[in-house]
Image (cartoon, rainbow, N blue to C red):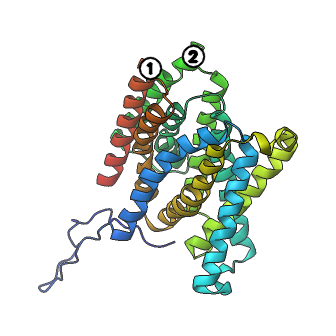
Amino acid sequence: MTSPAVDPAPDAAPVAPEPRTAVVPARRITGAVWAALSIVYVVWGSTYLGIRIVVETLPPFLSGGTRFVTAGLLLAAVVAWRQGPAALKANRRELGSAALVGLLLVLGGNGLVVLAETSIPSGLAALLIAAVPIWVVLLRTTLGERPGPGAVGGVLLGFAGLGVLTLPGLSGEVKIGGVLLVLVAALLWSIGSVSSARLPLPANPFTASAYEMLAGGLAALLVALLRGEHHELDLAAVSGRSWVALAYLIVFGSLIAFTAYAWLLQTAPVSLAATYAYVNPIVAVLLGALVLNEGLTRPIVLGGAIVVGAVCLIVSTERRG
């Protein structure tokens, strides 16, 4: 793995200063990291709307699997074209790790969100997914790390926000099953994100991303077959806007944004990569309200504000640590 893009202690004094001690400048977040973050911030926020439009007339796992297999093949072709076929080489351990991360991120994280959006608004799904940094802190704690008081407070505040966000499901305004699916998806996505920083993935992040998307996409297609989604598919009944939304998800949501995220996980701290979770919901909620006329109920607004505030607290605390 490459070194973090942010120095954890840029102002630390040398232990034994010498007469001509050189001043080492603090490492900064590079322009490439900011560009990748911007793509993940904006594009992924719009994918919740895209998913909601896709599942209007396309089955969830069949469309999701098609999305990621197509994007994975395209990315692999681009890597082979730009860097040569040798860039796609990976040993057995690296392939296994990429497959595992792909199953967690694509099948578990994204797949369950797609399934959930057949029954809940896209904005609510995005707000529930915003809890990813909260799960990341808890997972890192189980691995032996000790979060600071700010992170602990953020986790507690975040769970309070999640409690408020589940009220529409408990009151019957939306299906509680969809809410629970997204919560599980957030947990699986968090496990995949944390694991990707610890597993032996291919050194080329674009190669790793291609294999992750292929593994997760193929698994989603298998789930679609087991669910019998191919029997329900009627191509003549698929709307034009569902096809357009699927194409958008393949090119922008998967090929570009997912690759940017996979690159961030290998280049920047996980806590920094996870900051997308408090920008995506704002984009998703606004687009859902503007395009699909999704209602902004009091629990969604209040719970969403609490969760986003909790994530900001967690991330700002870790960036200072």
Kindly identify the residue that appears in the image at 69 percent across and 49 percent down. 64
Q: How many marks?
A: 2
- 283 w.r.t. 158: above or below: below
Q: Are the residues flagged by discs 2 and 1 in contact, CB closer than 8 Å?
A: yes
Looking at the picture, how far across and down is residue 37, in whole percent? 41, 58
Question: Tag 1's secondary structure?
Answer: loop
Question: Of the numbered discs in the image, which one, if any, rests on residue 266?
Answer: none
Query: How many neighbours does mark 1 have within 10 angstroms: few (below 14), some (14-19), or many (20 or more)?
Result: few
Looking at the picture, how far across and down is residue 170, in whole percent? 58, 15
**According to the image, label 1 marks what residue?**
297
Residues under labels 2 and 1: Cα distance? 10 Å
Relative depth, front residue between 19 and 169: 169
Which residue occupies the extreme left position in the image?
A: 19
Kindly identify the residue that appears in the image at 43 percent across and 24 percent down. 296
Kindly identify the residue that appears in the image at 33 percent across and 69 percent down. 31
Q: Is residue 260 left or right of residue 220?
A: left
Name which residue type carries label 1: Thr
| Snapshot quadrant of residue 156 | top left
- 315 w.r.t. 29: above or below: above
Looking at the picture, how far across and down is residue 79, in whole percent? 61, 78
Q: Is residue 100 visible?
A: no
**According to the image, label 2 marks what residue?**
173
Name which residue type carries label 2: Glu
- 231 w.r.t. 73: above or below: above
Query: How many neighbours does mark 2 have within 10 angstroms: few (below 14), some (14-19), or many (20 or more)?
Result: few
Q: Is residue 5 left or right of residue 231?
A: left
Q: Is residue 231 left or right of residue 309?
A: right
Looking at the picture, how far across and down is residue 236, in whole percent? 78, 43
| Snapshot quadrant of residue 290 | top left
Kindly identify the residue that appears in the image at 61 percent across and 50 percent down. 244
